Image: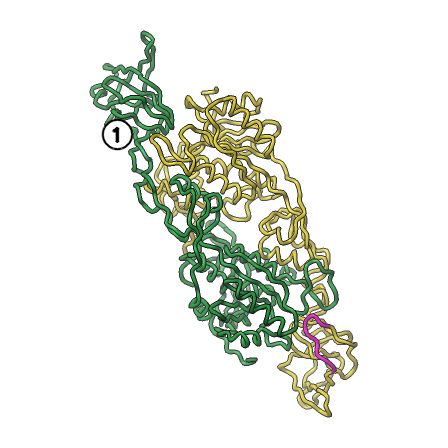
Chain colours: A green, B yellow
C-alpha cells in the first residue's frame, strides 16, 4: 500500500481519466422512447418547410395580375369557386377572375399567387353564387409563405450529441423520424464499502451509519444519463471482495466503489487494484473535498474509487465520472458548464488546495449569484440536497467575501462545455 | 360559435385557471423509486448527526485530564489498549493512562474526551506492548465532533413539495426512509385535432403535415412531472369526437387538445365545450403567440384547448398547464421562475400584445443573458429545440435592443416561484 501519495492537480487528473474515454454503442428506438436521450444521428429536414406554398392568414387566394389597377373607385369582383381548409387541396386550378376562400395553413391553389386577408375583402351573394370584392392591388407572392422558405430540404436541424427535449421531439415528428438513433446508456456499477455501513431499512446501532452514498450515486448516474447497477456492499473478506469486483467489471462499462480508498487500517481497494493488475491513474488529487479519489483502469475499463465521505464522493463523481458518461453518450460538451458568478455569501476559509464548495445558483437583478450550501455547521447535512453547482475556489487563496467574482460549475444544465 | 372573443390579460387568464387547481393523491414508494419525484412528507432527522461522539481524524482517544502539564520537557506515556475503526466500538471503557488508536469516523470510546492526531504522537513498543508518547496538553472535547452537533433529532431537513435529487436521496438513505411518500403524477390526456395531420410514420402527401404537437406535449408533460396519455387524433365527425373527449375526460385528471380552437370554418372544439356543458374560463388571451388558447372546466376537470400552431401550443402549455401540474404535485413554487436578464440580440418587432419569445439562457461575465431562439426565418423551425426560456416582452413596446434588461421565464429549472 502506497502511504506516500503524490497529489496531482485536478486538471491533470481529469485529463488522465479522459485518455480512457470511449464512445457508446448506438440503438434505434421508437420516437416515443427517445425523450431525454442523446441523438446519435443528425436530424435533417426530410422535406422543405413549409412543404408547399402556404397561406399565413384566413383570406382569398387570387391571381395578382387580376388586381392591377384596383382602387376604391375601381373595385374588382371575383367569383368564389370553393373553400380550402388546412389539410385540403383545391379541386381545380384557379382561373382568371376567380378567388378561392382559403384558411390559415392551407396550400395555395395552382394558378393563385397572392392572398387577400378577409379584413380587406367584401363578400356578397349574386344569383346563388358567392362573390368577393377587392379595392386594392396585390403583389405577386403577397401573403404567401413560399415552399422551403423556412427550411430547405436536407438542411441539418439538430446535430448528433444533442439531448432530446420537447422542441427536438417536435422536429423528429415533423420530419417523420418514427425511429431515431440514440446512444446506448453506459452501464455503471456501484459497490459500497465500509464495515460501518447499514442498509437503509436497518435500525441504527452504535458506531454504525446507514449507507447513503450508493443511493446518492445512483441518482447522480441517472441525472448524468447513465444506467446504474447497485451491486450492494462489499464485505470485509478480501477474496470475496476481489471476486465480486472482478465479476462486476465484466458486466459493466464503468465501475464505481465508494469508501475504502483512504490510508486507514481497513481500506482494501488499493490491494484489489493490485490483484486486478489495474493501472492506477492517480490516488491523490490536490483538491478538497475528495483528495483521496482514486481512478484505475483494468481490462480497459475505468474503476472510480470515490471517497466514503458523502461530499467528497459527490464531488469526485461530478468531476471525473460525469464526463466519462457524457463521452459514452456521444456528447461534444462532456464537461459541466463553467461560468463566472457573484459570490452570494462570505466564504472565509483559506484554500490551501483547490476547493469545490457545494452551492446553488440564484439570480439577482440580472446577475448570476452562487451561494455556498453548507457554510454553517447545521447546514452540512442538508448542503448536498440544495447543491446544483460547485463554487471553484483556487488553491492559495485566503477565502472570499460576498460580492467577489468566482467560478462555478453548473451540475444540472442540459448543455456543458467541450473543455474542462 | 363566439366569433367576437374578448381577450383577457395573461395574468388574469392564469388566475382563472388556478382557481381550479387541485392537489394530487399521495403514494408510498420504495426509496429506489423516489428519484426525481416530489416529496409528500417533510424529511426529518430520525437521529442526531453525528449519531455519536465521533473522531474527525485518525489519532488516539485520551482522557484530557491525563494530559494536563504535558510539555516538550514532560512527555506523557500511554498504554495503547486497542484500535477502533469506523463502524466498530471499543471493547471496554478507557481508563487513566490509557489511549485507544482511533480511525476517522469512529465512535469515541467511553471514558475518552479528546483525540490527539497521529501527527503529534510518537509510538513505540515496550515489553510487547504498544505505547504512545505525547508532549502537549489537550482540552476536553478537542478533536471530537459531538453527537447531534450537525443536526439534532427531529429537525426538518427537507420540506414536502421538494423534488428528490442526488443530495435529497442521500438524506433519505441516511435517515432510514426505505419508503417515502411522494405525490402521484397527475394523468394528462392529449388529443390532436386537424384534418391536415398525418401520423409520424406516414409519408408526406400534398396539403398535409405530420402531427408534431402531440409528441412535443408528451415531452413537456413529462418534463413538468406529469404522466402523459396520448389518445390519438380526433376525426372530423362531431359525434365521434364528442364521445372520445367525453370518455377520455373520465380517465384523466386534465385533458389537452391541440388545434381546433381558432375561428376557422373547421374548428370544432367550441361546439364540444358547449355539449359538455363546460364552463369556458376564457377563449382569447392578450398575448402572442397563443392568443386563441382556450381553457374550460367540465365535471370539475380542466380542459386545455391549445393552439394547433407548435409555438403557440408550447407557450400555452408552459403558461397555463405547467402550474396546474405543479399543484397536483404539491409544490409551493408552481410557476416558472421569472428572472431579470440581459437581452443578447436585438428584437425589433413591436409588441401590441404581451409577447413570449422563445429563447435560451446563456451566461456572460457574471450576467444572465437571454437570446431569442428564432429571430431569423431559417431558425423558426429549430427555435423550439433551442428553447429553455421565454423572453417576456410587455405589450405596447416598440421592440428592444441588445443589452436591454428584460424578464425571462426559466422553463427547465427544478425550482420555480410561488406567484406568477
Q: Nearer the viewer, residue A20 or B43?
A: A20
Q: What residue span does the magenta drawing correspond to? A: B81-88
Secondary structure beneath dot 1 equals loop
| Residue underneath mark 1 | A141
The residue under the point 61% across, 67% down is: A309
**Residue at screen point 50% across, 51% down:** A363
Q: Residue extending furthest top?
A: A127
Give how far across and how far down residue B75 sits, in percent.
70, 88
Would you identify the image quadrant in which residue B70 lies? Answer: bottom right
Eyeballing the image, is B402 above or below A198?
above
Q: Nearer the viewer, residue B315 or A322?
A: A322
For mark 1, does the 10 Å Cα neighbourhood hold few (<14), some (14 to 19), or many (20 or more) residues?
Answer: some
Q: Is residue B359 visible?
A: no
Image position, residue A378 (x, y; %): 65, 60
Q: Is residue B87 magenta?
A: yes
Above/below status of A57 relative to A122: below
Q: Nearer the viewer, residue B326 or A212?
A: A212
Horizontal arrangement in the rendering, residue B289 relative to residue B85 (left or right): left
Give coordinates of residue A242: x percent, y percent: 59, 72
Image x and y of residue B40, in percent: 66, 46
Extreme-bottom residue of the structure:
B127
Look at the picture and state if B263 lies above or below A155: above
Magenta span contains residue A109: no
Left or right relative to A310: residue A365: left
In the image, residue A127 sits, relative to residue B353, either above or below, namely above
Q: Residue at x 47, y 27 (%)?
A: B235
Amino acid at each position: 500500500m502506497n502511504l506516500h501519495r503524490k497529489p496531482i492537480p485536478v486538471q491533470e487528473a481529469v485529463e488522465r481519466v479522459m485518455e480512457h474515454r470511449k464512445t457508446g454503442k448506438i440503438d434505434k428506438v421508437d420516437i416515443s422512447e427517445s425523450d431525454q436521450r442523446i441523438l446519435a444521428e443528425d436530424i435533417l429536414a426530410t422535406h422543405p418547410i413549409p412543404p408547399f406554398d402556404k397561406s399565413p392568414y384566413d383570406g382569398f387566394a387570387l391571381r395578382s395580375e387580376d388586381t392591377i389597377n384596383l382602387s376604391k373607385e375601381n373595385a374588382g369582383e371575383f367569383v368564389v369557386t370553393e373553400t380550402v381548409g388546412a389539410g385540403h387541396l383545391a379541386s381545380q386550378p384557379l382561373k382568371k377572375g376567380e378567388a378561392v376562400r382559403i384558411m390559415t395553413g392551407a396550400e395555395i391553389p395552382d394558378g393563385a399567387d397572392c392572398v387577400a386577408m378577409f379584413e380587406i375583402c367584401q363578400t356578397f351573394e349574386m344569383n346563388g353564387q358567392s362573390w368577393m370584392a377587392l379595392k386594392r392591388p396585390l403583389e405577386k407572392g403577397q401573403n404567401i409563405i413560399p415552399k422551403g422558405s423556412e427550411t430547405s430540404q436536407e438542411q441539418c436541424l439538430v446535430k448528433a450529441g444533442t439531448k432530446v427535449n420537447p422542441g427536438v421531439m417536435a422536429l423528429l415528428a415533423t420530419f417523420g423520424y418514427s425511429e431515431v438513433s440514440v446512444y446506448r446508456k453506459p452501464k455503471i456499477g456501484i459497490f459500497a464499502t465500509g464495515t460501518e455501513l447499514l442498509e437503509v431499512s436497518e435500525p441504527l446501532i452504535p458506531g454504525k451509519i446507514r449507507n447513503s452514498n450508493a443511493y446518492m450515486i445512483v441518482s447522480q448516474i441517472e441525472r448524468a444519463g447513465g444506467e446504474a447497477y447497485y451491486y450492494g456492499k462489499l464485505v470485509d473478506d478480501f477474496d470475496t471482495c476481489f471476486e465480486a469486483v472482478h465479476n462486476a467489471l465484466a458486466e459493466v462499462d464503468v465501475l464505481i466503489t465508494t469508501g475504502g480508498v483512504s490510508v486507514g487500517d481497513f481500506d482494501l481497494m488499493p490491494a484489489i487494484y493490485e490483484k486486478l493488475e489495474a493501472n492506477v491513474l492517480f490516488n491523490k488529487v490536490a483538491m478538497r473535498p475528495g483528495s483521496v479519489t482514486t481512478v484505475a483502469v483494468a481490462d480497459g475499463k475505468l474503476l472510480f474509487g470515490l471517497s466514503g465521505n458523502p461530499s467528497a464522493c459527490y464531488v469526485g463523481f461530478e468531476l471525473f465520472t460525469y464526463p466519462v458518461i457524457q463521452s459514452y453518450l456521444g456528447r461534444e460538451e462532456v464537461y459541466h458548464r463553467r461560468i463566472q458568478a457573484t459570490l452570494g455569501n462570505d466564504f472565509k476559509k483559506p484554500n490551501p488546495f483547490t476547493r469545490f464548495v457545494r452551492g446553488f445558483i440564484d439570480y439577482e437583478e440580472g446577475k448570476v449569484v452562487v451561494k455556498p450550501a453548507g457554510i454553517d455547521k447545521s447546514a452540512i447535512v442538508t448542503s448536498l440536497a440544495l447543491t446544483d453547482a460547485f463554487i471553484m475556489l483556487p488553491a492559495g487563496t485566503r477565502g472570499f467575501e460576498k460580492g467577489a467574482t468566482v467560478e462555478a460549475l453548473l451540475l444540472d444544465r442540459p448543455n456543458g462545455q467541450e473543455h474542462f
